[in-house]
Amino acid sequence: MSLRIPVDTIRLAVPVLALSALLIAVFWLQPRAMSYLGLNLLFNLAVPIALATVAQMFILAVNDLDLSMGAFVSFAACVTATVLHSSPLLGALILAAAVAVYAAMGAIIHLRNLPSIVVTLGMSFVWTGIAVLLLPAPGGAAPAWVRSLMTAKPPLVPMAIVASVVIALVTHLILMRTSLGVLIRAVGGNQQSVARAGWSPLLAKAAAYALAGTFAVLAGIALVGLTTSADANIALRYTLLSIAGVILGGGEFVGGRVSPVGAVIGALTLALAGSFLSFLRISPDWQIGAQGAILVIVLALRLFLNKLERQERGG
Amino acid sequence: MPDSPSPRPLVELEDARLRFGVVKALDGATLHVRPGECLGLVGHNGAGKSTVVNILNGALPPDEGVLRRDGQTVHRNDINDARAHGTRCVFQELSLCPNLTVIENTRIVHRDLGGFGWRKRARQIIEDSLNRIFPGHHIDSQATVGSLSIAQRQMVEIAMAFSESSTRPRLVILDEPTSSLDATLAGQMLAQVRRFVQAGGSVILISHILHEILSTADRIIVMKDGRVSVERPAGDFTTQSLFEAMGSVAPEEGVTQQARNLSQAPVVLKVPHPTVPFTARRGELVGLTGLSGHGQSEMLIDLFRQHSGNWLPHRNPTVAFVAGDRRLNGIFHLWSILENFAIAALGDLTRRGFVDDAAVRERGAAWQRRIEIRTQDMNQPILSLSGGNQQKVLFARALGTRAPVVLMDDPMRGVDVGTKQEVYRIIREEAAAGRTFIWYSTEMEEVCLCDRVYVFREGAIVAELAGSEVNENNILAASFEGEAA
């Protein structure tokens, strides 16, 4: 019996390779980026993206798709910059209620067997609407604790890296190690077998949505901590970025196959793509195109490696 | 034994009735299972066996009738109550989560495993059970189920059903548990059933492989049209009488293919190989056999890939494929029967880029008559058919093309005996008319229908048997040759 690399390892190896390749390219173009300050600058904006990606991952784990992610993160950012800043208790309540709405959304999608794409697309207008009501023009201010958290300077390793590692670890624990996580992925894998074992797929789905809502709220808060203000459209591009991040990190659209560590790495890769372009002195207008190109390359690589693996197994 | 005064039944179902729309799934079924007894349940597809299973395991409440567990009438049928009572099920279609590891699937099945360190407990439970039932199974409990072969998945599922956590299994329902297992593994599973029953457990065994039922069950119930039609101790049945009780035609003697000499017929497919080259001739039934999962399906898929267009469809494809795992890669769940049938031959049924509806209907009707797809309306959704009839549609789909070679990937899995006989007849007719069939089967009876058989071991052909050499002993000998006992 030859030693075989498990498929899951390959799945994770590809995004790790992509991130390393991009990072090496950036360091080569700009050696000064290879410092505490440089790394922090490179990855600063990746933290909210990573949180949003992780949120999207919980939704993808149950075979759904959240098209309201960007709008919801913007909404959370607006709440953070206004109500949470002026009256923290009320702000916390609003955000908690928003998470509850997410859970309810999951329950309704399951109960009525609705397509999640339609429901979340509809909800995205609701979130944007509320955000505009809260903050008709860009503005607001970051609560002091958020600001200090996001600009903290831990020794040796910059905050952006620390935060990314913490996000990856926490979500890995939740989704891969706990019973609830197994249950959520099981709903994505085979909902019927979950029901046959006597679990409630409804509760599992609601839990997955609630977790997604929680991490999306954290994304909004982290974003305000970095930008110090908000506007109703601040995070619109997060919808597609978060989906791309999950897929880049080895996740699949169906079948409950997701990887939290991969998702965070995917988010970092996409965030780094922007910096890479500016080092190349290419207009940021090309950023989305570059991110798309990375996605295509990584997915092609994954297919290729999967094929190799299958051939090896076939002998 | 069956005559001895027996303890109170573990589960009883009395005059149960259940309808799905216009279909009467159960029409007054009455049956019971006692502790320490293996009940064999046989019947055609659509006879109501699966519905009985779903009532017993708590998934479906009967419209009418009484369900009793330990003599207590169940008022609200509930999966968790059934599980707490010790009911475990192995379903015909594999029902694990493919994205989770074996251990994680164990966690899902055993709800009470929770709390810190559940992985260790789950691992203990499933590995104990696997080792007990299938010694030397080579299944890594940390592997994702999706990376296991179908046979291994079925082994895991069986081991899962017999595994113990805080509630012990008391009634294990096995719905076609051996359909993907080879003879050795099936034997190990049936031995486990007997051990479990001797220790006081109850088993309901559903299988289309009648000798399994005859050798393992204590009592046999034959179901027909949603009712129990015959109920007798297993000792009172022979294969013949069981066939008759099911109302199907017993296979005539000497149905094994009369030797046909096809060595002069033109070769239609060829795979060069240093030791045993593979050839298939016009009008030939070529069997692929050996232990399950030793490369037979992969060979079929390779053949299909090589002989059908990869990017663009060929105008005249040489091969058509009949999938074994019909849920996974056979049927289009949302489509009608007719659409499911016509898809493979759509190229021939198209005029100027538009689907020729009349031609599709006509050809569909012709095949419906020919292969006897039991439906009033071919426009009904495919899922309205029973499993055996769905499989017939897949056969019709492949046979309805002009492809001279049909590849079959163990297509009779879980198909009832009557349907099988009908399909065998059609295959023989088509072969006589010059079609070539390459047929992977896990059932010896089917392999013995073939003109020539290739035996697989560990991904390669190890032997070729022709004509009168095709028999169980030779095949088993070739399958195990050189393997340490």
Image (cartoon, coloured by chain):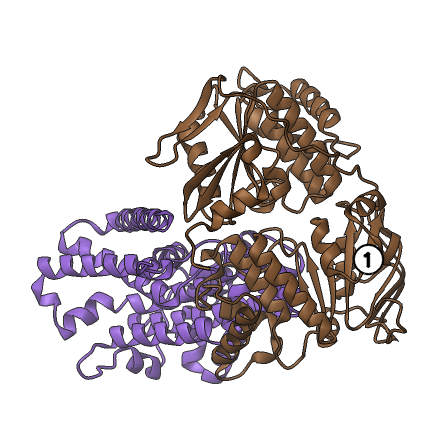
Can you tell which chain is drawn purple?
A
A170 and B183: which one is in front?
A: B183
Return the residue at label 1.
B235
B114 and B381: which one is in front?
A: B114
Q: Amino acid at mark 1?
A: Gly
> Quadrant of residue B186 in the image?
bottom right
What chain is tagged by disc 1? B
Q: Secondary structure at mark 1?
A: helix
Residue A139 location (% of width, % of height): 36, 69
Residue A278 location (% of width, % of height): 17, 55
B381 and B419: which one is in front?
A: B419
Please, which residue is most extreme toward the top here? B352
Res. A208 in view: no
Can you tell which chain is drawn brown?
B
Query: Quick check: A294 above or below A62?
Result: above
Q: Residue at x 49, y 64 (%)?
A: B137
> Quadrant of residue B176 in the image?
bottom right
Please state if A289 lies on the left or on the right of A247 as rendered: left
Q: Residue at x 88, y 72 (%)?
A: B4
Res. A69 in view: yes
